[in-house]
Amino acid sequence: MGRRKIEMKRIEDKSSRQVTFSKRRSGLIKKARELSILCDVDVAVLVFSNRGRLYEFVNSSSSSSLSQILKRYQDSTAADGKASIAAVETESSPSSCAEVQTCGELVKSVERYLEGPELENLRLEDFMRLERQLADALVQTRTRKTQLMLESIGTLSEQEKLLKQENEQLKDEVANLIGIPKSRNHKDLGVNNLMEVDADRQYSQPLRTLPLLR
Amino acid sequence: MGRRKIEMKRIEDKSSRQVTFSKRRSGLIKKARELSILCDVDVAVLVFSNRGRLYEFVNSSSSSSLSQILKRYQDSTAADGKASIAAVETESSPSSCAEVQTCGELVKSVERYLEGPELENLRLEDFMRLERQLADALVQTRTRKTQLMLESIGTLSEQEKLLKQENEQLKDEVANLIGIPKSRNHKDLGVNNLMEVDADRQYSQPLRTLPLLR
DNA sequence: CTATCTATTTATAAGGT
DNA sequence: TACCTTATAAATAGATA
């Protein structure tokens, strides 16, 4: 429904993809709103941009747990967004494995709690409270996980940069030792090229999947 | 975009509302699919019909936590459905308040875990595992909550039945004692009618809102 | 990037089968 | 009930500011 028909495949041109994203996203959310009004039903639409931003529609009349879940989800991503800014300037990931014991203990207590016989003796109110608190814990856990992922990415990209510099230096040294047969030609330095490709992969893949893993 | 423009408000005619629901729902999902393809982004659309049926679109390329959350959500509601059948034949809710201590302890350990300084020393893998386990715990908690709600409803409906029987007996006794002015007429026994209405409300309202509270 | 402007395509309301 | 038809409303692709 424009000047001409378009193929149903990924739009390759970045800027027109962005424009289409903006237009169609608002169109989708408008349609969702109309559907919920005209037909008096609950509708939720979530759209994640490739940069991890969340655009959502949830009709307000649904005070259902669905909207609560989605709101929580939104909150967690909002928190992540702030975390991502902070994470860049954080020092490299500590990865001390000493405290895993604590994690195991927590998990065990959760499992004990949910599987033990005392489960039968709790009241509805207790479960509603527990539900809220578990959901909050889950949000916080996810936020921390994303933070760690961003830190990993930062560390890896630093390492990549250092390796590239080192490679350049080594190439220069090799060229000097041999005697400059040709100027720096990337094609005949297979090993170094492979390393660069590997480094790129480590750097870019987490970025592509990260918004999905929150 | 039809033969004529329509007002943006709930369609009152039931059958044309149903037709519009069907058409616009599929339109919305088509648009969501197109957006996800053209712009290479993750999109989720959830539509709940008034009869509780869920129509969804989640673009398949996202093995994301979003679809996982929604799948979990679906699973938990499916599990709840089975629980509802079993819950009717369960005995009345125990509501022993003795074990709340355990609940508080669990919550505290979760909070301690997420707020304490040892949080900084855990690795990414630990948080991914913790996330899964918290999500599972959340699903189980929600299932148990729904079960308890259904049990409450069952108990209330039992009580209602017993109260009605008792009322009938009392009416008969009163009629016999006074001397049978008229045969059992419901209209002039205002108090009993009020009780019946109340009992009905307690029974039917939770049923109507329950799917939203899962 | 954001907003407007139209020629077109697309969605769909009303009606028919 | 569910699926066609078609006139019309709405969305939007591409261009332009």
Image (cartoon, coloured by chain):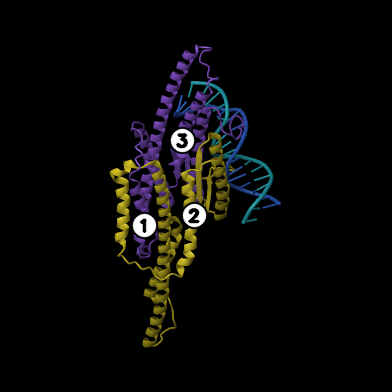
Chain colours: A purple, B yellow, C blue, D cyan
Residue indicated by mark 2: B75
Relative image position of residue A194 (x, y in whole percent):
52, 27
Q: Is residue A85 visible?
A: yes
The quarter of the picture where the C terminus of chain A appears is top left
Relative image position of residue A31 (x, y in whole percent):
51, 42
Residue appearing at x 40%, y 51% in the figure? B134
Q: Nearer the viewer, residue A15 or A111?
A: A111
Asked whether disc 3 touches disc 2, contact meaning CB atoms under 8 Å apart, the reply is no
Q: Chain of mark 3?
A: A
Q: Is residue B84 left or right of residue A81?
A: right
Q: Which mark is residue A128?
A: 1
The residues bearing labels 3 and 2 have C-alpha atoms spaced at a distance of 29 Å
Asked whether disc 3 touches disc 1, contact meaning CB atoms under 8 Å apart, the reply is no
The amino acid on which the numbered mark 1 sits, given as a three-letter code, is: Met
The amino acid on which the numbered mark 3 sits, given as a three-letter code, is: Pro
Q: Quick one: label 3 or label 1, which is nearer the N terminus?
A: 1
The residues bearing labels 3 and 1 have C-alpha atoms spaced at a distance of 36 Å
Q: Chain of mark 1?
A: A
Residue indicated by mark 3: A206
Q: Secondary structure at mark 2?
A: helix
Q: Secondary structure at mark 3?
A: helix
Give the label, 3 or 1, closer to the camera.
Answer: 3
The residues bearing labels 1 and 2 have C-alpha atoms spaced at a distance of 19 Å
Q: Secondary structure at mark 1?
A: helix
